[in-house]
Every structure is written in structure tokens, then in C-alpha cells.
Amino acid sequence: MMNACSPIPHLLWFDLTQEDSSDDIPGQFADSCRISRAPGVSLTGLDLRLRPDMICLQYDSPDALGLNRLLAIKRQAPSIPVTMLTVQHSEELAIWAFRSGAWDYLVLPLANAERQRYLRALRQLCELRRNPPSGRQKRPLERSQELPESVRLTARAQKQQPLERVMQHIQQHFHEPLDQKSMADLCNMTPIRFSRAFKDVYGVGFLEFVQSKRMEHAHDLLLNSQMPVSSIAYASGFKDPSYFTRAFRQHYGLSPSEFRSRNSIAGLKLPVLPKTREAERGWSERLALPILDMTGLALPIE
């Protein structure tokens, strides 16, 4: 939150994205800044006497045309600092941005900590620009000296980080309808890019991952509740109990009812019984329980 004495930064926002995105990036700054959206892709016709504090250029996948527009805008208004925001990121692109005169460089989707860091620095910049120090006294602009998070993370963690919001959403809403498009929107990615990134990080596709999560939940309910199988199907995110039964058999090798019967003896929850008679005998001896054959009849322990 800004205090009453803090200057409200004025951002002039250029949308140079090539793909439609439902994630409104300027909206993430609306509570702390005054935002004017540029009607075109250049400063032509804009009244720069309004003196924006920052020019923001938003990209998804920067191309030569879009990057040249940054250079052109910087030439037209050299005294106004520029922030570059981009989904596609590389070390070479960041180096190019700073060599081209960018004041800051933000990688999307924007983590909250990075957003707060940027706003703190932006407010300090605005205060210095609007109220320059008198005489020879100069107030240094405080910039974060912490190492960027991407430096501290492993290569795998860097890939995983943009998907954290999706994983949290899956954990909380796996029993609800989930589609790849809405999950891609959470990451500010296209569905194709999200699908590739998800499989690259987790080794399976998004739908397969959600199915596995639902199966784990059904597994736990079968072992630890007396809910009917159809109710477990709905509680785990399956719309059709018949499909749930087929999918469960394919996943675990048993129908839900068979799985529950084989893993619950007199109310005692057991792991899935091994398939060999020798292993079954070992489990029964350790638990002092009779061995059950597939009919449910007790067999003597020799």
C-alpha cells in the first residue's frame, strides 16, 4: 500500500503482444499506479507534456519489429525511462534490453515479490524525478541488491516456477472440471506453450496428471471411508461412475470394489496384497490374520 505522501507513478503502457492473453498485466499495477494505454505502437500523436513517469512495453515473444519499436520510442523520448515486460526470456534478450537503455526488465508471469520490488523502485524514481535534490546533494536511488531468484534456482526450478499457480489450483480444485486453456491463462501462456512446459517439467501431460491426482484421492477414500463407489467417483472429479470404474481398473488393475475388498479386512486398512501365495502368507503371519481367497473364505495357515 502507498502512503498519502508517496507519488503515484504514471505509466504509459504499450501492448506489443502478438497473442491474445486473458491475463491483464497492466491491471496488476492498477492499484498502485495511474495507467494510460497507448492507442498505437509509437509515440506519434501522443501528448508527452503529460510526462509519464515510465513507458512500459509488454511483449509475449519479442520479434525484430517489436524490439525496434522499443529503440524508436527510446529515441523519441530519451528522458523517460522504459520498462520492458516479456514472457519469452533469455540472457541475450535481457542484455540487449539494458544496452538499449531499458530502466528495468520484468519476466512474465510476474511473481508478487518481483512486483513489489519494482513498485518500490518506481516510487523512489518518481519522487526523485518530481522533486530533484537541491544544490549538490544527491539522493541515490535504492535498487535491490539481492540476487535475482532465477540465479538462486536450479534449471528445473526455473522451469517449474511459472507453473506454481497451476499446481496450487490443481491441488485445491482437482475434483472440479479443469481444462488446459484456463490453466494456460493462469500462467499467461498459450495452451500449446503451456502443454509443452507442463510435460517438460512433470514428465506427463496435464490431463494425465489431473487424472492421476483424482485416482490418488479415490484410492484414499476407498481405503479410509465407507462412501459408496459412485459417491467416491463424484467426489474425486469424475462425472460418470462407470467411466471411473473402468479408469480405476486400468490404473490399479482392480475395480474400486475389488480394491476395497482386498485392502480392508475386518475394518483394518492394509496395503494392496501381493499377488503371490508366499507373500500373502507372510502378510497374514505378521498380522495374525487368516488368508482370504478370492471368494472371501478363510484358508488355513499351515
Image: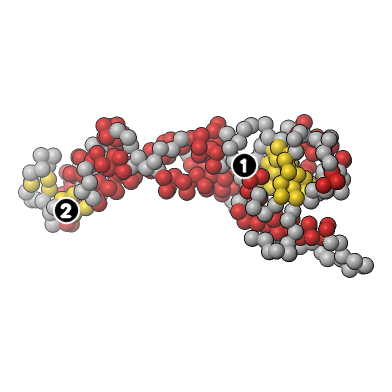
Amino acid type for the residue under numbered disc 1:
Asp
Is residue 190 found left or right of 140 in the rendered image? left
The quarter of the picture where residue 8 lies is bottom right
- Mark 2 Cα shell of 10 Å, populated few (<14), some (14-19), many (≥20): few
Is residue 202 placed above or below 151 in the rendered structure?
above
Residue 290 location (% of width, % of height): 10, 51
Q: Which residue occupies 87% across, 48% down?
A: 79
Q: Which residue occupies 79% across, 48% down?
A: 52
Amino acid type for the residue under numbered disc 2:
Gly
Q: Which residue occupies 65% across, 49% down?
A: 30
Q: Nearer the viewer, mark 1 or mark 2?
A: 1
Look at the numbered disc 1 and give the secondary structure of its residue.
loop
- Mark 1 Cα shell of 10 Å, populated few (<14), some (14-19), many (≥20): few
Is residue 126 found left or right of 252 in the rendered image? right
Task: Answer yes or no: is residue 207 visible.
Answer: yes
Name the residue nearer the viewer: 186 or 296: 186
Q: Which residue is mark 1?
A: 24
Look at the numbered disc 2 and give the secondary structure of its residue.
loop
Q: Which of disc 2 and disc 1 is earlier in sequence?
A: 1
Q: What's the CA distance linking mark 1 and mark 2?
A: 53 Å
The quarter of the picture where residue 22 lies is top right
Name the residue nearer the viewer: 52 or 162: 52
Report the colour scheme.
Answer: secondary structure
Q: Which residue is mark 2?
A: 267
Residue 86 location (% of width, % of height): 68, 41
Q: Quadrant of the N terminus?
A: bottom right
Contact between marks 1 and 2 (CB within 8 A): the answer is no
